[in-house]
Image: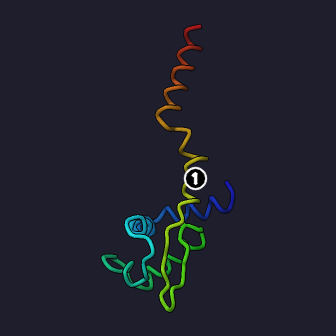
Amino acid sequence: MTSDSHDIFKALADPCRRELLDRLTEENGQTLGSLCERMAISRQGVTKHLALLEAANLVVVVWRGREKLHYLNPEPIQQIYQRWLGKFEPQRLQALATLKQALEDK
């Protein structure tokens, strides 16, 4: 596992960070204030979680004047999906099961 993958998995391991990513999926380009709404942690806590998400490249920041907008970067998650999860798609699993059955029938 690369250090990038390690950072991504570490960032995804926390439920608060996953909630922030979910909120950005629902509405991308949010300010810190809007992300803090409905969170069960302090503004400082949200800031720390966002910093970890930024370090893992899961969130990117765009400044609009004085506003700091947070955007979801889905690329690292897509890379994780392709490397670790994509091989377990139903079509692939079915193909493997068919191959296994054919080998057992020989």
Q: Residue at x 45, y 69 (%)?
A: 17
Work out whether residue 49 or residue 61 is closer to the camera in this orientation and state it.
61
Q: Mark 1 belongs to which amino acid?
A: Ile
* Quadrant where the image shows the C terminus: top right
Q: Is residue 6 above or below residue 93?
A: below
Vertical side of 57 occupied by 81: above or below? above
**Left or right side of 33 for 57:** right
Quarter residue 35 falls in: bottom left
Outermost residue toward the bottom in this view: 66
Label 1: which secondary element: helix
Callout 1: few (<14), some (14-19), or many (20+) C-alpha neighbours within 10 Å?
Answer: some
Q: Residue furthest right?
A: 2
Q: Is residue 38 above or below residue 21?
A: below
Q: Position of residue 15 (x, y in %)?
A: 41, 65
Q: Residue at x 60, y 53 (%)?
A: 79
- Residue lying furthest top: 106
Q: Nearer the viewer, residue 25 or 15?
A: 25
The quarter holding residue 3 reads bottom right
Residue drawn 48% across the image and 82% down it:
47
The answer to which of 71 and 1 lies nearer the viewer is: 71
Please give the residue where the numbered disc 1 appears in the rendered image: 80
User: Where is residue 76 drawn, in percent x and y?
Assistant: 58, 59
Residue at screen point 34% across, 76% down: 39
> Where in the figure is residue 91, as x and y percent of width and height?
49, 31
